Image (cartoon, grey):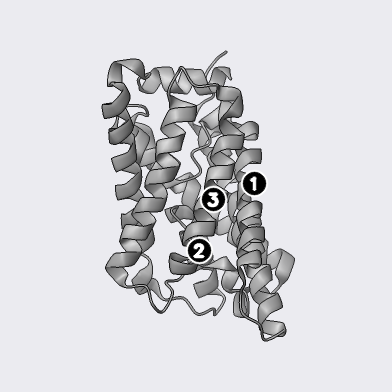
Amino acid sequence: METPSLFKRCFAEGIGTALLVLIGPGTAAFNGIITANNNESTTLADIGVISFAFAIVVMAMIYSIGRVSGCHINPAVTMALASTGHFPWKEVVPYLIAQCVGGAIGAFGIVTVLGMDGVLLGNLGATVLAPSTGYFQGIVIEAIAAFILMFVIMGIAVDSRAPKEWGGLVIGLTVGGIIMMTAGATGASFNPARTFGPYIVDSLLGGNINWIQFPIYVIGPIIGAMAAAFTYNYIVGTRELPLANETIHNEVAK
């Protein structure tokens, strides 16, 4: 099967990231509206629902656009794959732009569904540190979350010996599990585009965003994802894994 053009793959990444933000942070924003109107605190059950929403949309996107673009929908994943030779560096910037633009479009989609309450009460599902979480601690937590995700991606999606038909289910459930564990501390982003979309749109529409925290959601995920990719390569040996062109071909052929 012929590899789709870079434009088509970036277009797919933009759509995938937009839908990720619409469904994932959108569910978090809706929960924020409910808790604000009822003067209640977010519960573990609420986190479970939000985690499940993320898991569902990640699974759906992998099975929908995985064969087109590889379904990175996360700049940290793209950079980790490139850093270990499983994705061409010359295509990294177009992918990152597509993902960030998609994240912003998805955030505007939340406004379309929830209205200004989604901005003023739900904060568009924007990630924020808990009062008890320090800045450096936040970076470490986001790095750990991205490490877990990327390690699983390497094992189930990149390694040619893995059962690829299970990739969407395994990765989606992993995302849900990570969110359950880390949402209370950092908001559980481990995806710079997922944080960027709600941040930029919330700021444009008069929401309350602390941009000082944004580097946490860039530095942590990139470090964690790269560390996971190199760690997996070290464990299994680079000769057991496909190189950049092979990875693209394998994703397209699924």
The secondary structure type at the circle numbered 2 is: helix
Residue 177 shows which numbered tag?
A: 3
Q: Amino acid at mark 3?
A: Gly
Q: How many neighbours does mark 2 have within 10 angstroms: few (below 14), some (14-19), or many (20 or more)?
A: many
Q: Amino acid at mark 1?
A: Val
Residue at 41 percent across and 17 percent down: it is 246
Cα gap from disc 3 to disc 2, whole angstroms: 10 Å
Q: Position of residue 13 (x, y in %)?
A: 54, 40
Q: Which residue is mark 1?
A: 57
Q: Position of residue 34 (x, y in %)?
A: 71, 76
Cα gap from disc 3 to disc 1, whole angstroms: 14 Å
Q: How many neighbours does mark 1 have within 10 angstroms: few (below 14), some (14-19), or many (20 or more)?
A: many
Q: Position of residue 206 (x, y in %)?
A: 54, 80
Q: How many neighbours does mark 3 have within 10 angstroms: few (below 14), some (14-19), or many (20 or more)?
A: some
Q: Quadrant of residue 44?
A: bottom right
Q: Nearer the viewer, mark 2 or mark 1?
A: 2
Say which label, 2 or 1, has the lower sequence index.
1
Q: Which residue is mark 2?
A: 183
The secondary structure type at the circle numbered 1 is: helix
